[in-house]
Structure formats: C-alpha cells, structure tokens
Amino acid sequence: MISVLNYGAVGNGIADDTTAIRNAIAAVGATGGMVSFPAGTYKISGTLTISSANVTLVGEGIGATRIVSTSTTGDLIKFFATPSFTGGGVKDMTLDFSGTATAGAAIRIDGQRLISLENLWILRPFQGVVLEGDNRTCRLRNVDISDHLGNAFTVNGGGNQYFDNCTTYNNVAGGGTAAFLVTQAEGVWLDKCVSQRASYGLRVTPAASQYVLDLWIDACDFDSSISDGVVFDSGASGRITTVNWNGSRIGFGNARGLVIDGSHTQNLQFSNLRSEKNLGHGMVIGNVLGAQFANASFLGNAALGAANTFGANIIGGTGVVFTGGRSGAYSDDGNNQKYGIVFGATFTGDALVCGTDLRGNQTAGAFNGSGPGVLFRDCLGF
C-alpha cells in the first residue's frame, strides 16, 4: 500500500491534488496494489483514470476521506483500458462535486472485470455509477448516492452485476432519469436496495437491439418516485426476459406504481410485491408474455382520489396470473381505488385470478371488460 501523501498530495481541500494522486496510481499500476487516502479532503480538477489490474483506492471512511471534483463535465474516477483488465476498486470514502455537474459520472467502469465499490457516499454527481461496455462481475456494496442530476446507477452492458444495500436519495433534476437504470445486461442482482425521490425508482428500458436477461430484485424499496415507480418496457424491438422479484415494495409515488409493457417483455415472476399509496394505478400492464404474481398487494392507490384509478389495470398481453394476495385498502386509511383489478376491453389474452382478496375498493373488487379468456376463482369481494 502506498499513500497519496508520499506523492505530494496535501488533502487540505485547497491545494489541487490531481497530479499527485495520478502519480500514486501510476506507481502501483505495474503490479497492482492499494492507494491510500489518509483522512482529509482531496481537491481534484480532472479524471483519475485506472488502467491497470488490481488497483484499489482506499480511504479511511466515509466521514474521514473526501475527494472533491471541481470539474462539472468529466468523470471523477474511471476504470478503462484496452484490452480489459481484472480486479480493482474504490472503498471507504466520500466522492463529491463542488459545482453543478452537467455531464460525466462519479465512477465509470467501462468493459472491465471484477471491480468492487464498497462503503461510498457520492454527493451531487451528474451520473453516479455507470457500468458500460462488456463489464463482468462488478460488485457494489453500501454505495449511497444523493442529490444526483442524472441516473444514480446505470447498467448498459456486460453481465453478472451485483448491487447490495445501494441507496439513492433526491434526484434533483427529475426529467426521466432513474435511481437504477438497466438498458443492456445479462444478469443483474439488486439486493436490499432503496430509492427515494428519484424520477423513476427502477427503469428497465432496452433500446432497439438491446436486451436485459435475468434480473433479480430482492427486498428492495422504491419510494416516493416523481414519475412511475418501477418500469419494465422493452419497447418495439428491445427484449426483457426473466425478471424475478421477491419481497420488494413500490410506494407513495406521484404516478403509477409498476408499469409493464413492450412486445418482447416476457417471463416475469413476482413474489410478495407491494404497490401502495401511489397517486396513479398500483400497476399497469400494457403488454407482456407471461407475468405471474404470487401474494401481490395493491393497496390504497389513487392516494389522492384520482378518478378511474385501479389497484391493477391490465390492458394488454397474455399469460397473466394472480394467486393469493390482496387489492384493496391500505391499513385503516380507506381506499380510493375504484376497482381492485381491471381487465380492459383491449386485453385479449388469457389470465387467471385465484384466491385474491378484492374487498374494500370503491366500486367493486374487479371489472372484466375483456372476454372469456379471463377467469376469477375463489376470490373474496368478487
């Protein structure tokens, strides 16, 4: 391990430490190793690029070590080299921006392997962490991003990306950005992750010729979104295949809770989903090929009494199955949902609702405007 202080860094928040830190990174580049940042505030004016294997930047803790970038358009830390390398990371520090960032990311990992980010607080970035190119097996643990102007976490390429206890708060700009954005990936795991006040909590939106395969969401919370809480939308020519959702919540958003759409969105499995107290529908399905909901709850949506707003509104797709669960009132606060579950006239596929509690909605438990392909069995309140 070498210290940036030994290469001329001052760490007083006044001197520009960019060159000293770059020299320290270069010194361990040939063999790899840890670059130590003792407690202090390190001001930098340009990107810190890591282009060798097994280089890790290590601070003395989130409250002790800060790197502050004065750049408003560039990346703060970037992992990139051709050909790609394996190993390295950033841990135990705060990354901050002194001005209003309009481009760039706090950390960008482009086409590398086994990069680890751990115990980080990222403040005021344009984008927080960007994983792009053919990244493989990057692991993020205890990474908190606050006051982000763009997307907080972005996955656009590669596979086997792991997010554990990663949190975001306060998407300053809104405007269609997300706490977690996934556009291209083969294997993404979100475990105990939280978003608050992002434009979208989670947005999975592959563009033309992009695909998202195997997405796992476990014990996550998407709260107080400015727009829709969670969106899975493959559009006209992207692909989303195999989503596994377990014990995760969407709540108190300004629009719809969960949105599923796209002609190539298929094989979605939801266990113990909660979509509650959103201002719009608890869930909308525009198109899907196979979506199963075990013990899902849509509670107290249409939170401010918007007309014609439902717990779940299914207007397209096929292979939609609800088993157990509930669509009705949220606690003792009453319920403004007009219906618990609605199948619209444009739904022409097959669906089954079995053993679901549909009591406590404003007009009725359910409404089936579709045809004989929709079956309700052993449901309470309908």
Image (cartoon, rainbow, N blue to C red):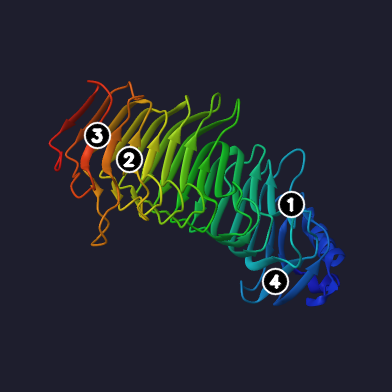
Residue at which label 2 appears: 312
Which numbered disc flags the more N-terminal residue, 4 or 3?
4
Distance from label 4 to label 3 (Cα)? 56 Å
The amino acid type, in three-letter code, at marker 1 is: Gly
- Report the residue at 79% width, 70% height from top: 43
| Circle nearer the viewer, 3 or 2 | 3
- What is the x, y in percent for residue 195? 49, 57
Residue at mark 3:
367
Q: CA distance from mark 2 to mark 1?
A: 38 Å
Which amino acid, by three-letter code, is at mark 2? Ala
| On screen, residue 254 above or below 68 | above
* Dot 3 amino acid type: Phe
* Residue drawn at x 64%, y 68% as measured from the top left: 93
Instruction: Give the residue type that dot 4 points to.
Output: Arg
Residue 142 or 348: which is nearer the viewer? 348
* Residue holding disc 1: 104
